[in-house]
Image: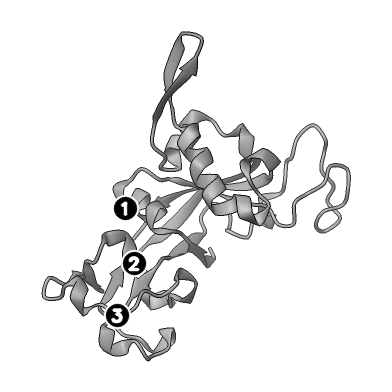
């Protein structure tokens, strides 16, 4: 079993904490090209993309991911480097609640928090969420189903046409996906290949 870090924004962390988000999708890098060697001499079958999951940078079933999210330490520690900070910590997804290692710290408020620090700079000991990978697969972004979009923590939208209407989660997923990845060249319209990682919270 290996343990790796993974970044989530505040919206995604809220979904994980609420039990709504049990999947995450991340672009395969570099993007494969049909019929051309990709990694380790492996070539994509034009009919399907059956990538060995050992190539997944987020692990295989049984591995663990510790979550990096936007965070803050005490205001008095603003001048310290991330690795030098000590608890308690605040997490942006929680809207200002202070956390100690053993749970919430009721004696502190958001006014005691220092500057928000990027998730990429979160040290391991400041992470409060650990996820266990339960499944890994590869698919193109436009292959997502409404059920999978719901498992991504997305909201339902009443949609349809020509007198046929239904609740669908993919509309919100497209919005969220493009807000993160369109500017990076992996937008919905580009239909990139993705790692689909299913997980459950272990901590």
Instruction: State the quadrant of the C terminus.
Output: bottom left
Query: Helix or strand or loop: what does disc 3 sit on?
Result: loop
Q: Residue at x 36, y 57 (%)?
A: 202
Relative image position of residue 123 (x, y in whole percent): 43, 78
Q: Viewer-nearest of labels 3 and 1?
A: 3
Among numbered discs 2 and 3, the one appearing first in the sequence = 3
Q: Residue at x 54, y 53 (%)?
A: 180
Among numbered discs 2 and 1, the one appearing first in the sequence = 1
Q: Label 2, label 1: how many angstroms apart (C-alpha)?
A: 11 Å
What label sits on residue 17 in the rendered view? 1
The single residue placed furthest to the top in the displayed view is 163
Left or right, 30 with reference to 118: right
Relative image position of residue 148 (x, y in whole percent): 49, 35
Among numbered discs 3 and 1, the one appearing first in the sequence = 1
What label sits on residue 128 in the rendered view? 2
Q: Residue at x 49, y 33 (%)?
A: 171
Crowd tier of the residue under label 2, counting other residues whose Cα lies within 10 Å: few below 14, some 14–19, many 20 or above = some
């Amino acid at each position: 079993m290996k343990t790796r870090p993974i970044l989530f924004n505040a919206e995604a962390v809220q979904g994980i904490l609420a039990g709504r988000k049990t999947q995450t999708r991340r672009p395969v890098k570099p993007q494969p090209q049909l019929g051309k060697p990709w990694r380790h001499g492996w070539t994509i079958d034009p009919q399907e993309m059956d990538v060995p999951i050992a190539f997944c940078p987020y692990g295989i079933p049984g591995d663990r991911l510790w979550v990096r999210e936007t965070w803050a330490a005490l205001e008095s520690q603003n001048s310290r480097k991330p690795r030098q900070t000590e608890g308690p910590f605040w997490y942006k997804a929680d809207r200002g609640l202070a956390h100690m290692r053993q749970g919430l710290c009721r004696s502190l408020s958001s006014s005691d928090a220092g500057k928000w620090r990027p998730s990429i700079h979160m040290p391991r000991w400041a992470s409060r969420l650990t996820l266990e990978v339960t499944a890994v697969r590869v698919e193109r972004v436009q292959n997502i189903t409404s059920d999978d979009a719901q498992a991504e923590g997305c909201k339902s939208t009443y949609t349809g046409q020509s007198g046929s209407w239904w609740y669908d989660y993919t509309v919100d997923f497209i919005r969220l996906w493009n807000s993160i990845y369109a500017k990076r060249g992996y937008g919905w319209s580009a239909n990139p290949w993705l790692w689909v990682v299913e997980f459950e919270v272990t901590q």
